[in-house]
Image (tube, rainbow, N blue to C red):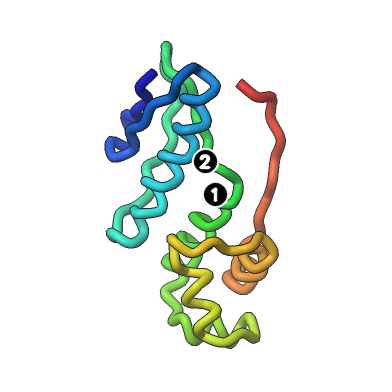
Amino acid sequence: MVVSFPDVPEAITQGDDLADARAQAEEALGLALLTYPERGLPLPKPRAKRKGLTMIAVAPDVAAKLAVLGAFAATGIAKSELARRMGKDEKEIRRILDPRHATKLPAMVDALRALGKRLVIGVEEAA
């Protein structure tokens, strides 16, 4: 079963069955979206549900990382300033802002707080 995303054409994957396809789709979407900040591209805006398409959300850690990257870019501050605000070494800030580096949730929450944002988590019924 092949999965693609009309709004994120670089995210294409497949799964052996529907459950596997959804799991693969979540990962492919997250990996594709994490390349957008590096390429200087804005994240695509989610569109309203379209008939015949299934909504796929990225993993929570990917969503948090994308939020940090977006908030940092929007502020226009330097990494050294974020480091100062967080009381951390600039090397640690570079890792937090690296889309390919796994970052623990508390560090991303702290980064968002230092950027004047807060992380909001919600729960919905699974598709």
Q: Distance of mark 2 from mark 1, alpha carbons?
A: 6 Å
Whether residue 5 sits left or right of residue 24 in the image: it is left
Q: Residue at x 35, y 54 (%)?
A: 35
Q: Is residue 49 above or below residue 114?
A: above
Q: Quadrant of the C terminus?
A: top right
Residue 58 bears which disc, if any? 2
Q: Mark 2 is on which residue type?
A: Val
Q: Amino acid at mark 1?
A: Ala
Badge 1 crowding class, 10 Å Cα cut-off, few under 14, some 14 to 19, many 20 or more, is some
Which residue is more in the foreground, 114 or 2? 2
Q: Residue at x 60, y 46 (%)?
A: 60
Q: Position of residue 109 (x, y in %)?
A: 66, 63
| Percent of width and height locating residue 20 | 51, 25
Mark 2–mark 1 CB contact (< 8 Å)? yes
110 or 76, nearer to the observer? 110
Label whose residue precedes the other's in the sequence (2 or 1): 2
State whether residue 61 is above or below residue 50.
below
Q: Which mark is residue 51?
A: none
- Assign the N terminus to one quadrant of the image: top left
Question: Considering the numbered disc 2 on the image, is that residue within a helix, a strand or a loop?
Answer: loop
Residue 63 is labelled as: 1
Q: Residue furthest top?
A: 52
**The one of 85 and 104 positioned closer to us in this rendering:** 104
**Residue at image point 65% right, 86% down:** 87
Q: Secondary structure at mark 1?
A: helix
Instruction: Left or right? Give the position of 96 relative to 36.
Output: right
Position of residue 69 measured from the top left corner of the image (x, y, whole percent)? 47, 62
